[in-house]
Image (cartoon, rainbow, N blue to C red):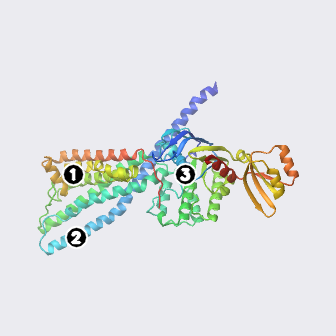
Amino acid sequence: MTAPTRPEPFGVELQDVTLSFGKDEKHPALDGLSLQVRPGTITGLLGRNGAGKTTALSLIAAMRRPDAGTVLVDGEDPFENAWAMAGTQLVRESGDTIAATKVADSLGYYAELREHWDANLAAGLVDLFEIDLRKAPESLSRGKRSALGAVIGLASRAPLTIFDEVYLGMDAPSRYAFYDALVEDYTEHPRTIILSSHLIDEVERIFEDVVIVDKGRVLLAESVESVRARGVSLTGTAAVVEQFVDGRRVLARQRLGSTAQVTLFGTLDDAERAAATEAGLELGAVPLQDLFVHLTREERS
Amino acid sequence: MTENLAGPTALTDREVQRATMRRAAERRSLRTSAWSMCAGTWQIGVWFWAIVLIIAGIIGYVEVRTDILDGSVIDGVVSGSAKFFLFVMGIITPLAMIAVHVAAGGTRRSFIRSAWFTAVFLGLTFAVVAAALGYVEWLVFRSQGWSPELDRAQLYVDGGQVGTAFLVQLFFCSVYWLSGAAIGMGYYGFGVWRGTFAIPLFLVPLVLVELAFQSGYFGRPFAQAVGLADAQVLTAVVGGLLGLAAAAFAFHLVTRSVAIAPVTT
């Protein structure tokens, strides 16, 4: 018997998608949202609470239907589409499991349905995260349940794998173990990964593309390099830094003794860069988190 | 020229490959879901039958010792409880499975089909056990010279009519499980208020099957009230099939587009 052919990574496209949960809502959960996810990339989906991230991901994974607009996964409408659904794995927080039976039963269910399920990887990750297979998911701690979700997402080897705030309750070592496992497995088995997280500082290093949503709309969708090029950070003596940034749009300020670090929105031309370097300032890329805070704050104000 | 020819050919191959994988995925998810629901229900079902036997044994022992034994004991315990046990399991089981099924890449369509299969499988297997227990009891009663007749059954008079007893339990168990499943999914999809208001609709299949087979406390008065008291087995089977089809349709209706909420623990 030959192993099943591994499908190519899936791309995702949402066009003008709208979804409301009720008439009482101030604004729809998704309000004409359009975005594209390139196949074979790790894309970060960022947004404040209630921005519409989870709703958008639910549509991609065919958990529900939009009120209007088009959702395409690998070029097809994913809703009740056996091809798209079999190739998409959404892990919502702790993952969807059979809550009252053993963890092993839930993993067994995924193993049966997921054509490319890697049982060895699952077993290794269960050991790594110290998950008790004999316990019911509902009796696991919050962190262990999230780790179980991480195991499901990684071992599924789905052409489109989505982690929606899967880190909740996980301690720092577990989170970093998850990030490392994700990058390692992604390198060996390329696929499309969407990662939604509030811990931007921790995960930005693994993103290739970034989508920022707010109030059900996309604020920004670019490669990480492009995003970082939207700003610059300057580090140096506080007085020099302040003198240099005077009149510019400042996203964030940090100060430690006489040293200051400032994040600026916008780019510096070659002459400005040279002047900054000559003034003893160190130039760096803009932290994604600063840009995210700035963009979402500006949108809401 | 080669490029012009390669385009359509490649597209066709891709479509064929996808169609094959779609069918394989549907088969895989139907099989897994059906197996999980059947095995999960039977894991608890074993305990149900053990308790049924213990209760029937105690009742039989007491009735023999006090000399009030008057007809089948097993039928009294099984007829009322098996279908209600499956009704409750029908509410619980699909609710526990739907989120993990869709999250694992299964379609609602395969889930619906697996639920239909599960209903019939559970109906068949529970009916086999019920009919077998009734038959064994009938043999014991006859050997002891006790009356094996049933108190309330309409289509068969004692456990010796194994085929009819099997048929009655098959329809009751299948329809009750599937109606329970429709009620559970109704609450899941519509929410508490609308789910509650929809209950009378989901109970229509139960009314049909009770009318058709006239067993238990409800069926016989129902049938008398609508002039079906003298219905024969064939008529009952037609009514049972209608009830099964109605329950299957109700479950399909509430599940086919249901939004999948995350599992919360």
Most distant residue in the right direction: A278
**Left or right: where B114 falls relative to A133:** left
Residue on which the image places disc 1:
B210
Q: Quadrant of residue A119?
A: bottom right
Amino acid at pointer 1: Glu
Q: How many marks?
A: 3
Q: Are marks 1 and 3 in contact (CB under 8 Å)?
A: no
Vertical order, A258 against B230 (above or below): below
- Numbered tag placed on residue B57 in the rendering: 2
Q: Are marks 3 and 2 in contact (CB under 8 Å)?
A: no
Residues indicated by labels 2 and 1 sit on the same polypeptide chain: yes
Amino acid at pointer 2: Gly
**Left or right: where A39 falls relative to B201:** right
Residues indicated by labels 3 and 2 sit on the same polypeptide chain: no
- Label 2 crowd (10 A; few <14 / some 14-19 / many >=20): some
- Numbered tag placed on residue A189 in the rendering: none
Q: Residue at x 22, y 72 (%)?
A: B58
Calculate the distance from the C-alpha at mark 2 to the C-alpha at mark 1. Answer: 27 Å
Most distant residue in the top direction: B1
Calculate the distance from the C-alpha at mark 3 to the C-alpha at mark 2. Answer: 59 Å
Chain under callout 3: A
Q: Can residue A106 be seen by looking at this rendering?
A: yes
Q: Residue at x 22, y 53 (%)?
A: B168
Q: Can residue B120 be seen by looking at this rendering?
A: no
Report the mark closest to the observer, 1 or 3: 3
- Label 3 crowd (10 A; few <14 / some 14-19 / many >=20): some
Tell me the element at label 1.
helix
Tell me the element at label 3.
loop
- Numbered tag placed on residue A50 in the rendering: 3
Taking depth in this image into account, of A270 and A147 the one nearest to the observer is A270
Chain under callout 2: B
Q: Are marks 2 and 1 in contact (CB under 8 Å)?
A: no
